[in-house]
Every structure is written in structure tokens, then in C-alpha cells.
Amino acid sequence: MDSSSEFTHELDRDLAALEAKAADYAARHHRLATIAWPAGVRIAVNFTADFDAMLLRRVLNEPPQQLAKGEFGGRVGIWRLIELFDSHAIKATIFTPGRICELYPQAVKAAAKSGHEIADHMWEHQVPKDPVLERDHLRKAKDAIETLTGRRPVGTRSWHTRELLIEEGFVYNSHDSADALPHYVSGADGSGALINLPFHYAIDDAMFFSFAWLNSDNQAQRMMDPDHVEEIWWAAFQQQYAQGGYLNICMHPFVSGRALRIAMLDRLITRMKALPGVWFPTCEQVARHVVAAHPAS
């Protein structure tokens, strides 16, 4: 085989592999072209907070200054977010690692008492590769949340395997970003479908307001003007509002809990509420509605 023929053969092989991968991905991700929201609703907006505090910083062995920044989220930021959501009668979803229930129990209980959903965010912000240990971590996180709130979580934002989540009674994950609308993720044969509520890093506060994020270099720092971020998120909301869609806003108490950013969120929510047909449910409410209105085929 000459070099040109060998090159063509390699291209064909690579193309076949890509096509197979694409087919497998398509078989596992089931899109919903539109969502039939409740009567009078044009768009569902989930306000979500990943209540990590310093856990991820510890996992990455980051310096004390970064740990302190995470602690701000547990001592101050989470309380400001609860106050903000309560002032607007919004029921948010707080994705909470099990360890946080030990570190900041009063904050978790206060959020639950206000009617916010407390959902799983792994035991200590990581999923073990060993299946036995993974199950142990998930069950410990579930138990910790139930002990504080009196209710077992039915949602997660995690890398836990889909099969384990279904086995443990979870209704949804909010992690995969394969679509702008809620969609199903299943096995390649269509079995074991689990609803996913997508978020995107363009609607994630950490992408805009993080100094020294994940040990990044100076040139990678992101300290944007809150007014600028407000307009980016408002534009994202308007685009989905026009389509009758969905928006999942991802925040972190140690990031969005800063005073200027709380003020920005207050303005953003006020703008959203001025339009008709805007629904501010918990992630569980969205997931249960979609499953009922659009059951997995």
C-alpha cells in the first residue's frame, strides 16, 4: 500500500469511528423539541446554587487563601442568596455535598425551611471510580441531607453513574449540557432514561467572577463587571423566553454571595418578573413536570 492509499485508509477508519461515536451519543441523548409548560407559562427559570464552600479547594489541595474564599460561601454567601430568593418568593435548588451538611448544617436547614430544594452534589465534590465506594458516597450524601431536612434528595448535580442514580431513586440530574432544554439520557438501547436539566458555563457565575480559579495562571483570571454579566444573562433569558424555553442559572455562594453580585441578581430577577409567563420552580418541579408531560419513549 502506497503512502496516499494508507493515508486514505486512515481517514476512512477515523471517519467510521467518529460516525460510530456520534451514533452512540445520539442513541443515548433523547431531545425534546419543545416543552409543554403548565398553562400560562412561557419559560421555566431554575436558580441553582452549588454549595461547595471549600470542598473543591481541599480536593485540589489549594492554598489557605482559596480555602478562606470557599468558607465565605458557607458563612456569608449562602445566607445572602437565601435572603435574595426569599425576597422574590423564588424557590431555588441548592446542590449540596454531604460534607457541607456537617460543616454548615444551620445554612442547609435554613434553606430547606424556606422551601428551597436541597439536592445532591456528591459526598465531597468527587465521585470515586470504585463502584462500591461510589455507592457508599452517594448513600452517605443522601442520608446527610435527609437527616438535616427530613426529606431525601431526588435530584443531583454530579458525575454519578446514571444506573446508580436510578437505582437509588433519583428523578433527575442537572449536569449534562447536550441541549438547551430538558432532555433524557439513557443507555445505548434506550433503557434507563433519566431526565437531565442542562446548564451551561455561559450562565455560571464562576466563569465570570473567579480570581485564581482552579490554580489558573494570572492571564486566565476572570473578574468581570457585574453589570456586564447581568446583560449577558439577560440576553440568554430573552433568547429562551422568545422560544418558550428553559434557563438554568448556576451560582456558587462563595462567588455570587458577594454584595455587588447579589445586587446584580436582584436586578436581573426583577427584570425577569416584569414579563408575563415566567415560572421560577425548583429543579424537582421542572423534572417532575417534564416526566409527566413528556414521558421517556
Image (cartoon, grey):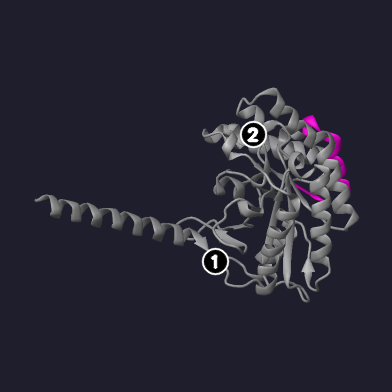
Q: Residues within 10 Å of mark 1 (few under 14, many from 20)?
A: some
Q: Nearer the viewer, residue 160 or 192?
A: 160
Residue 122's label in the rendered image is none
Choose between 286 and 14: the one closer to the eye. 14
Q: Are marks 1 and 2 in contact (CB under 8 Å)?
A: no
Q: Mark 1: which secondary structure?
A: loop
Identify the residue at image location x=81%, y=41%.
78
- Residue drawn 78% across the image and 66% down it: 279
Quick check: 162 left or right of 2? right
Q: Which residues are magenta?
A: 101-118
Give the class, few, some or many, for how many residues have Cα within 10 Å of label 2's Cα (few <14, many ≥20): some
Query: Is 130 left, or right, of 111 in this rendering?
Result: left
The x and y percentages for residue 184 are 57, 61
The image quadrant that residue 247 belongs to is bottom right
Q: Name the kind of residue labelled 2 in the image.
A: Ala
Q: Is residue 106 within the magenta segment?
A: yes
The amino acid pointed to by label 1 is Arg
Residue wearing tag 1? 31
Mark toward the viewer: 1 or 2: 2
Residue 169 in sight here: yes
For image coordinates 62% across by 54% down, the residue present is: 202
Residue 212 numbered tag = 2
Residue 80 location, quadrant? top right
| x and y, in percent, of residue 245 in the image | 66, 69
